[in-house]
């Protein structure tokens, strides 16, 4: 860079990250040793510019995205030529490697490259859809024509159509979701073997493997419509899991552990994954059965996420406009205690559920889902929003990094506070009715007395109603699990029905 003349000269392509904010905002920079550093800008009204040399993989996928954007533009033009008044196209491609081993012997090695273009066209309020994995011009013409022909024979729907242009994201920020890593099959196989070996090394009571697997994938997503929006971004994801079986006398128990990240190097250590899977399986041996009772329960963090998954369904637009939710007409009313706060943060750098726009191109923004126990919003895609006479909230395709605000200490502190009750580590079955909130699921975990874990328990059922369960939340722990779209710690519920033997 020639600083005197203000001219930038680069010997290789770069990726430019800009942060301009008056509030808290993540940024990244390169230190003197060339290492990426991440931090937070705090109420500083300046622009942070980060120039990151792009790797050959990044350059390649950037070129591929640009080529796909041109294909999308061609297909949108074809749709209008064939009589569509509007159209939208979504295309995603994923490529990568998956490996599974069992007892340190390779079971499967899979290479995959998947992707397809889906187009929806509208003739007024008539909709037609088609898809293709062939992006040649002839195939695009056939696909677009098929969608237009279908639209001619569908009924009009006053709620059909593209999202409102004013809600769209035309300049998506870089959320640092793409970190390519070349991983040879031999390397992936060795990772699964090491995980299993670490598990077997914990105890001779680990008698068998339930399998270890590694997955490393990268790809991109492009969305475009006739509002003039064509946007896309690359992403990567890596995961490693290990499951084992523990046996002592006539009892056998299984459990597993996993790690997942956008960045290969940020995954948990392989040995830790194997060790934790073994320790979890061993802790379940010699389980007790208990009688039917009512008692407080703790949903451990990895199990607690499912509680809020049911909330996602209950306040989702499809359930609401069909009037099949127990939380119908509950916005701005208390559904949880005052100490409960849930926010959504779609733009967390490297977040597993981060996205700057939803599957309809609608801009995602920070939202408050529950504030001091009060439900503040529904989760609406465009069609559901129009059915309800409301506006899209950018949730076509799912949620984006829900965060529970911790109000208690870690799991050990919560167990002490509960004093007596059921620590739930595993849930089974699908006995949840979103229409009326009835909740009944199989569960296993540990019985707690005097603030201490006493013994594992299994073959029990927990039951209640989600409306009551949410109102009886005592607190959220600080042991936040970020391995999914809901970031939550363990959840203490004041009282639940526990059906035992």
Image (cartoon, rainbow, N blue to C red):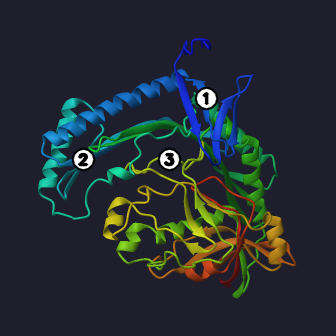
In three-dimensional space, the C-alpha distance between marks 1 and 2, rounded to whole angstroms, equals: 36 Å
Image vertical order of residue 124 relative to residue 221, above or below: below
Regarding residue 99, the answer to whether it shows in the image is no
Left or right? Give the position of 203 relative to 310: right
Please identify the quarter of the rendering in which residue 440 is found.
bottom right
SS assignment at label 2: strand
Q: Quadrant location of the N terminus? A: top right
Question: Which residue matches tag 2?
Answer: 87
Nearer to the camera, 310 or 115: 310
* Whether label 3 touches label 1, CB < 8 Å: no
Question: Which residue matches tag 1?
Answer: 50
* Residue 219 percent location from the top left of the image: 47, 36
Label whose residue precedes the other's in the sequence (3 or 1): 1
Please identify the quarter of the rendering in which residue 304 is found.
bottom right
* Residue 341 percent location from the top left of the image: 64, 67
- The mark closer to the camera, 3 or 1, is 1
Please identify the quarter of the rendering in which residue 40 is found.
top right
In three-dimensional space, the C-alpha distance between marks 3 and 1, rounded to whole angstroms, equals: 20 Å
SS assignment at label 1: strand
Nearer to the camera, 439 or 91: 91
Q: Residues within 10 Å of mark 3 (few under 14, many from 20)?
A: many
Left or right? Give the position of 95 relative to 491: left
SS assignment at label 3: loop
As drawn, the label of residue 355 is 3
Q: Residues within 10 Å of mark 1 (few under 14, many from 20)?
A: some
Report the number of discs.
3
């Amino acid at each position: 860079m020639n600083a005197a003349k203000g001219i930038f000269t680069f010997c290789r392509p770069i990726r430019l990250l800009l942060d301009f904010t008056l509030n808290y905002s993540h940024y990244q920079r390169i230190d003197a040793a060339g290492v990426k550093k991440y931090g937070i800008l705090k109420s500083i009204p300046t622009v942070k510019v980060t120039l990151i040399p792009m790797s050959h993989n990044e350059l390649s996928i950037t070129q591929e995205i640009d080529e796909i954007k041109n294909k999308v533009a061609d297909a949108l033009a074809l749709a209008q030529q064939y009589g569509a008044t509007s159209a939208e196209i979504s295309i995603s491609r994923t490529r990568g490697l998956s490996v599974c081993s069992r007892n340190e012997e390779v079971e499967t090695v899979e290479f995959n490259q998947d992707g397809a273009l889906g187009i929806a066209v509208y003739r007024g309020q008539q909709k037609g859809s088609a898809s293709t994995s062939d992006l040649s011009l002839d195939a695009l013409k056939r696909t677009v024509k098929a969608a237009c022909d279908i639209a001619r024979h569908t009924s009009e729907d006053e709620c059909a159509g593209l999202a409102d242009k004013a809600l769209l994201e035309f300049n998506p920020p870089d959320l640092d979701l793409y970190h390519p890593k070349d991983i040879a099959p031999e390397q992936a196989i060795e990772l699964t073997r090491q995980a299993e070996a670490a598990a077997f090394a914990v105890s001779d009571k680990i008698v068998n493997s339930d399998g270890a697997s590694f997955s490393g994938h990268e790809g991109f997503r492009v969305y475009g419509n006739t509002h003039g929006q064509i946007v896309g971004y690359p992403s990567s994801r890596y995961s490693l899991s290990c499951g084992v079986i523990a046996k002592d006398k006539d009892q056998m128990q299984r459990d597993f552990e996993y790690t997942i990240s956008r960045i290969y190097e940020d995954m948990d250590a392989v040995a830790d994954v194997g060790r934790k899977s073994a320790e979890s399986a061993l802790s379940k041996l010699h389980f007790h059965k208990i009688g039917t009772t009512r008692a407080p329960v703790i949903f451990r963090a990895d199990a607690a996420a499912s509680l809020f998954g049911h909330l996602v369904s209950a306040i989702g637009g499809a359930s609401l406009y069909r009037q099949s939710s127990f939380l119908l007409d509950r916005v701005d009313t208390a559904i949880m205690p005052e100490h409960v706060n849930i926010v959504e943060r779609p733009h967390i750098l490297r977040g597993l559920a981060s996205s700057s726009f939803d599957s309809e191109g609608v801009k995602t923004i920070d939202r408050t889902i529950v504030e001091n126990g009060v439900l503040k919003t529904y989760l609406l895609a465009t069609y559901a929003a129009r059915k309800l006479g409301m506006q899209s909230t950018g949730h076509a395709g799912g949620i984006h990094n829900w965060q529970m605000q911790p109000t208690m200490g870690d799991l050990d502190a919560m167990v002490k506070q509960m004093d007596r009750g059921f620590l739930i580590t595993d849930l089974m079955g699908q006995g949840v009715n979103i229409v009326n909130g009835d909740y009944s699921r199989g569960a296993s975990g540990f019985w707690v007395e005097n603030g201490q874990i006493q013994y594992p328990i299994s073959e029990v059922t927990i039951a209640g109603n989600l409306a009551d369960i949410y109102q009886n939340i005592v607190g959220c722990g600080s042991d936040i699990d970020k391995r999914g779209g809901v970031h939550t710690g363990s959840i203490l519920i004041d009282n639940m029905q526990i059906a035992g033997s």
